Each structure stands twice: as structure tokens, then as C-alpha cells.
Amino acid sequence: MKLLAIVHSTHMGNTMQIAEAMAEVAPLTIAPFEDADKYNLLQYDAVGFGGGINAGSHDNKLLEYVKKLKEVPKYSFVFSTSATGKSRKYNAKLIKLLESKGSKVLGSFGCKGLCKFFIFALVGGVNKGRPNTDDFDAAQSFIEDVVKSVEREKQSK
């Protein structure tokens, strides 16, 4: 089993911390977004796309990267960190994009992360101490479920 996570983590490094927690319990290679083109996505059983949420969406650079992919991985997953933790809402755009390109999205994860953007910087940020051990544990459970889903998908073929 080989998993890859392409991580666009720019603001506080929250999303990279989540990816690193996932890699502790799964065969996950982490690719910083800047290095994503160095990887052949089709060599992995599933590819994750993760990033921080800004203005209700993943960064346009990550969305454009996925839009321009000529070939998408058969299976994928999406993850994010945000000031509100509303991953279902925020991950939906990237999920829809991956599905429209033919990738089966096996799951979506999100949690709150420290945010010092704009006005929040005046008070030292919101969600201090996030992501935390509970978030890391939840991310690890999530990636374990993704691994199980990949295994089920492979067995059903």
C-alpha cells in the first residue's frame, strides 16, 4: 500500500501537522505542494490533497493544480484545517473537482487550526493550541479508514 499526500500548507503549518500525524500510522508519503510535480500520482494507491482554508475554500493554487491534472489517481482523499473546522462545507469544492475528473474520493477530513489571519492577528489568533492531540488522533483514525477503503476497493475488483 502506497499513499501520497500533497499538502498546500502556507499560513501556520496546521495542515502539514495533520499530514505528519497521518504518516505516523499509515504508509503515507508527504509531498509539499511545491514538489507535487515530482511525483507520479498514478503510482500510488490513493492520493490525498490537503490545505488550509482561506475565504471558504482551498487555495486557488491547489485547485488549479488539480484542474490541470491530465490523469488523476483512481482513489483520493481530501483534508483541511480552518478557523471554523467546517470541513464538509469547505472540502466540497475540491471533492467535486476530483470526482468530476474521475477520481473516487474515499473520505474527507478537517479540523480547526490556529488562525492569525487579518483581524485575528490583533488578539494573537483564534484556536490557540490547534490542531491538538485530539485532532491528530482523529486524523490518524481518518487515514486508517482510508487505508481500509482502498483495501476493500482493491478486493472488490
Image (tube, rainbow, N blue to C red):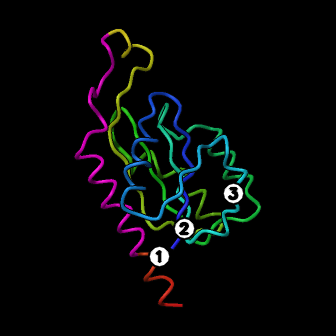
Q: Secondary structure at mark 3?
A: loop
Whole-percent x and y of residue 73? 63, 67
Disc 1 residue crowd, few under 14, some 14–19, many 20+, Cα 10 Å: many
Task: Name the residue rendered at 54%, 67% in the picture.
Answer: 46
Disc 3 residue crowd, few under 14, some 14–19, many 20+, Cα 10 Å: few
Q: Which mark is residue 39?
A: 3
- Residue 140 vertical placement versus 154 (above, below): above
Which stretch did the figure color magenta?
A: 123-148
Circle 1 residue? 150
Circle 2 residue? 46
Task: Give the residue type that dot 2 points to.
Answer: Ala
Residue 124 sits inside the magenta stretch: yes
Dot placed on the residue nearer the N-terminal end, 1 or 2: 2
Whole-percent x and y of residue 131? 31, 38
Dot placed on the residue nearer the N-terminal end, 3 or 2: 3
Q: Which mark is residue 29?
A: none
Quadrant, the C terminus: bottom right
Whole-percent x and y of residue 5? 53, 54
Residue 43 lies left or right of residue 76; in this view the side is right
Q: Main secondary structure of the magenta part?
A: helix
Task: Give the residue type that dot 1 points to.
Answer: Val
